[in-house]
Amino acid sequence: MVEVMVVVAIVGVLAAVAVTSLVEQLPRARTKSAARQLRADLQKAKLEAIKRNTESLVDFTLAAGLDSGSCITCIDDNSDDSCTTASDTIISELDFNDYKDVALSGADFSGAQVFIFNSRGVPEQLNGAMCSGTAVVNCTSDNNFSQDVIMSNTGRVRID
């Protein structure tokens, strides 16, 4: 009987340690997941531009106050340089509020938070100049952890 109680106590201690470790890793896992989703949305916008032989727009909104930020990609049907759900063909919408402890803390694509993929899948500024940059997905509960989604001027998207 004593042996069973000792085994149960050991299993209880090990379970408590494992659960604590898992809970500490969840915010980082959510941050990585959000960064992967952002990369996928950028790649989808690029492919839609090529497939439809038109421009696709990528529009970032940074975290502010209680809003964790967002990224909307669309075909800008009304040519107003923004993705409005009423008048544009939305390709994807990524709301960082859907990810607990995650925020879009930065988006700088050649000095702007909006850019397009042209019909060849190459990123450009709204004025037609070449574009590259980084979006920073930050773990709000661990300020030392973030994921950079980096886009080159050829349209290659990667996560660092």
Image (cartoon, helix red, strand yellow):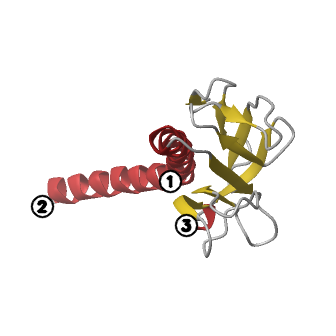
Residue 1's tag is 2
Q: Answer with left or right where residue 30 lies relative to residue 82.
A: left
Q: The N terminus is located in which quarter?
A: bottom left
**Visible in this render: residue 105?**
yes
Residue sitting at x 27%, y 53%: 11
Q: The C terminus is located in which quarter?
A: top right
- Mark-to-mark CA distance, 3 and 2: 49 Å
Instruction: Measuring from the top left, give residue 141's x and y in whole percent.
Output: 68, 56
Query: Tag 3 or tag 1, which sits nearer the N-term?
Result: 1
Within the image, what quadrant is residue 118 found in? top right
Q: Amino acid at mark 2?
A: Met
- Mark-to-mark CA distance, 1 and 3: 14 Å
Instruction: Measuring from the top left, give residue 149's x and y in whole percent.
Output: 64, 37
Frontmost of labels 3 and 2 is: 3
Which of these two is toward me, 8 or 42?
42
Q: Amino acid at mark 1?
A: Leu
Query: Tag 2 or tag 1, which sits nearer the N-term?
Result: 2
Which of these two is toward me, 78 or 107?
78
- Report helix, strand or loop for mark 3: helix
Query: Tag 2 or tag 3, which sits nearer the N-term?
Result: 2
Mark 1 — residue? 26
Q: Amino acid at mark 3?
A: Asp
- Report helix, strand or loop for mark 1: helix
Which residue is most to the left?
Answer: 1
Which of these two is toward me, 132 or 125?
125
The answer to whether mark 1 and mark 2 are in CB contact below 8 A is no
- Report helix, strand or loop for mark 2: loop
Q: Judge whether 160 appears above or below 137 on screen.
A: above
Mark 3 — residue? 98
Instruction: Measuring from the top left, give residue 99's x and y in whole percent.
Output: 56, 62
Q: Residues within 10 Å of mark 3 (few under 14, many from 20)?
A: few
